[in-house]
Amino acid sequence: MPKPSYLALAKNGELSRRADALFDHLKDCDLCPRLCRVDRTAGERGFCGVGDKVMVSSFGPHPGEEPELVGRHGSGTIFFTSCNLLCVFCQNYDISHLRRGKEQSCEALAVSMMRLQGLGCHNINLVTPTHFAPQIVRAIDIAAKAGLDLPIVYNCGGYERVEILRMLDGIIDIYMPDIKFSDHAAAEKYMHAEDYPDVVKMALSEMHRQVGDLKVDDRGIATRGLLIRHLVMPGGLAGSSEFARFIADEISKNTYVNVMAQYRPEYRARDYPELMRLDIPEQYLAAKQAFEAFGVRWQPR
Ligand code: SF4
C-alpha cells in the first residue's frame, strides 16, 4: 500500500509550517467561506461558535461508513464539535448546533489518532473538520512523527475555501465532501449559505485536482481520492440532476458518488413543512437515475 504523502511533509518540516500558517488564519478567521473575520485566539466567535482550542465530541472505529473506508476493522472516526454549515435539519444537531464535546490539546488529538491506528482502523476519518483545520494539521504532524501512517479522510459538508484546501494539499489522502443543495435559494433557506452551490463546485474541482478519482488497494480499502456523498432530500430539494451534470462534465465520470437515502427530519425540520415530506424512496430512485443518466459510475482501481 502506498504511504500517505503527509509523512514526507512531516519529515521535511512542511507540515509544521502549514500548521503555523493555518493557525495565523484564526486571528482574523477566514478558514471557511463565511469569512467571519473574528479573532478566535482572543475569545471572539464566528458563525461556528468555537475558539482556538479543538473540540471533539467522540472518536472510535466506525462500522457504518462506506465499505471502502470500513474494511474489516472500521474507519477511525473523530467527530469534531460544531460545524460551519449548521443545516436546519441536521441529524447530528447535538454535536453541531448544541456543540456537545470537549476542548482538548493538539497533542491529545494526536494521541486519539494513534489509538485509532492501534485499534486496526483503516484510516483517520475527520468528521466536520473545516473550522479546526489548523489544530488538525498540527495533530497530524505530531502523530506522524510518532508513527501514524494511515490515510487521512477529510469528511466535510463541502463548504470549503479553495485557498484553504490548497494548504491541505499533500496532507489529505481522501476527500469526502457532501453535496447538499444545487439551488441557491434552498441553500440559503436551509443552511444560510446562498453561495453554497458555487462554492461546493469549486471545492470539488480543487479536491479532485489534488487526489483524483478514488483508488483502493487489493483488499478494496480506499487509499486516496475523492468520494462524494449526496444526501437525497424530500421534494427534489437536493437538486441531484445538476450535481450529476456537473460531476460528469467537470470532475470525472469515474467519481465515486454515494447517493444516500437516510434523510430523516431532525432539529428544526418541523418548522419547514416541505422537509417533512415522506417521499425519500422516490427521490432516491430519481437521484440514482440522474447520476446513471449522466454516466457517473465509479470503477475501483
Ligand atoms: S471557521 Fe468559523 S469563525 Fe471561521 S470563517 Fe468559518 S464559520 Fe467563521
Image: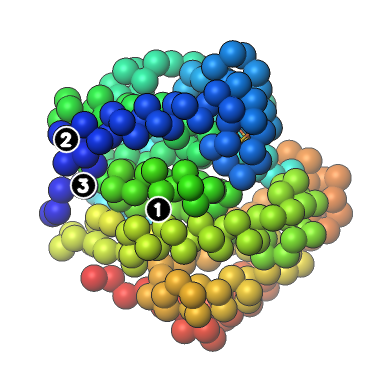
Q: Position of residue 159 (x, y in %)?
A: 58, 49
- Residue under the image location 86 percent in, 54 percent down: 273
Left or right of 184 in this view: 139 = left
Q: Nearer the viewer, mark 1 or mark 2?
A: 2
Q: Image quadrant for the N terminus?
A: bottom left
Question: Does residue 63 appear in the picture of this structure?
Answer: no
Q: Quadrant of residue 180?
A: bottom right
Q: Position of residue 183 (x, y in %)?
A: 73, 65
Tell which of 224 and 197 is nearer to you. 197
Q: Secondary structure at mark 3?
A: loop
Question: Does residue 106 appear in the picture of this structure?
Answer: yes
Ligand 1, seen in the image, is in the quarter at top right
Left or right of 144 in this view: 252 = right
Residue located beneath label 1 in the image: 175
Residue located beneath label 3 in the image: 4
Pointer 1: residues within 10 angstroms few (<14), some, or many (20+)? many
Tell which of 273 and 297 is nearer to you. 297
Residue located beneath label 2 in the image: 12
Give, as a three-letter code, the residue at label 1. Tyr
